[in-house]
Structure formats: C-alpha cells, structure tokens
Amino acid sequence: MAEWFECKIKYERTMENGMLKKVNEPYLVDALNFTEAERRITEEIAPFMMGEFQVSDIKRARFAEIFETTDESADRWFKAKLTFVTLDEKTGKEKKSSHNILVQSSDLRDAVKRLDEGMKGSMMDYVISSLAETPLMGVFHYKVDIPEKSE
C-alpha cells in the first residue's frame, strides 16, 4: 500500500502583470518516510522551478485509493470521503467506516462519475459523505531507481 505525503513548496511566482508573488503549493508524493518524501519532491519539482524554492511543510496524507486519468482536461484533484456500511455478523449491527479517495477530474460532476466508475468493482455498499476540490497541484508516484550496469 502506498504511503502518501503532502509536501508544500514555497517559491516566488511571476504573475501575468510581471509582479512577483510568494506562493505555497501542495503536491502529493508516494514515499517511504518524511526524509524520502522531501528528497523526492525536491527532485520532481527542481526541473520546473526557475529560482529558489523550499519545502515548507510535509505531512502524511491518508488516501485509501487514487483514481487518476490521462484525460488532458482533468487538471484538478478532488478529495472524496466514502462511508462504507457493513453488517457485524455477531451483533447484527451496522458498522460504518470512512476512507478518503483522491479523484483526478475536470469538475465536480465528472469527479462523481469517475469515483463511481472506480468503485464499480467494489462489493461493499458506500455513500459519498463529502466531495471537495483540493489545492493539490500534482501527484508523484514512487519510482524504483534501477542503477545502470557499467561494463
């Protein structure tokens, strides 16, 4: 299972009017621990930055699943809270558990559609308790570094 970390990058962005503005943008990184998350986000972001930047914050992000798409128009990320209802066989009572799902989509309606498509194979009943757009700018999956063989 992936361990996700939300990393915030602080840098100065040049606005359309030419003025510089300090921004703090969040990204999601799949890493083993906080140290690796900082290293990985630095490596991923560095090619896109013109000036100096810093990792201003790192925190764990709990996502049970991430539904991504290759659709060019899906440039936003939505956090869905799903509530699963199960029946406890011993007591006969309903038991509820919640999980966060991240969905890449172009808008709210599309996010619900993609969420339902992603959950199609699930045997459990669920309810979408909440669905909201996140400020996430991107998601970086874990990549295995394979050293090249030297002859």
Image: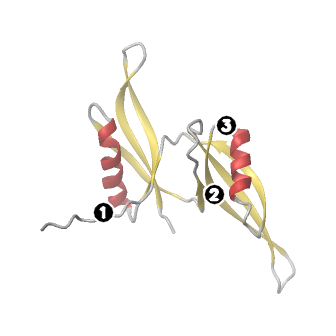
**Mark 2 and 1 residues: CB-CB less than 8 Å, in contact?**
no
Q: What residue is pinned by disc 1? A: 145
Residue 59: x and y in percent read 45, 54
Task: Indicate left or right for 13 with 102 as reference.
Answer: left
Horizontal placement of 78 versus 45: left or right?
Answer: right
Crowd class of label 3 (few under 14; some 14 to 19; many from 20; radius 10 Å): some
Residue appearing at x 59%, y 35% in the figure: 73
Sequence-first disc among 3 and 2 = 2
Circle nearer the N terminus (3, 1)? 3
Q: How is the image coloured?
A: secondary structure
Quadrant in the rendering for residue 51: top left
Look at label 1 and name its amino acid.
Asp
Vertical placement of residue 25 versus 3, above or below: above
Asked whether disc 3 touches disc 2, contact meaning CB atoms under 8 Å apart, the reply is: no
Q: Nearer the viewer, residue 119 or 131?
A: 119
Numbered circle sitting on residue 107:
3
Instruction: Report the residue marked by disc 2.
Output: 100
Judging from the image, what secondary structure is the residue with disc 1 in?
loop
Q: Quadrant of residue 19?
A: top left
> Whole-percent x and y of residue 89?
83, 84
The one nearer the camera, 21 or 120, is: 120
Secondary structure state at the residue bearing disc 3: loop
**Which three-letter amino acid code belongs to the residue tagged 2?**
Asn
Say whether disc 2 or disc 1 marks the residue closer to the N-terminus. Answer: 2
Relative to residue 30, is residue 79 drawn left or right?
right
The residue under the point 34% across, 54% down is: 40
Numbered label tally:
3
Residue nearest the viewer, comparing 25 with 105: 105
25 vs 142: above or below: above
Q: Is the residue 1 above or below the residue 76 in the image?
A: below
Which of discs 2 and 1 lies nearer the camera? The answer is 1
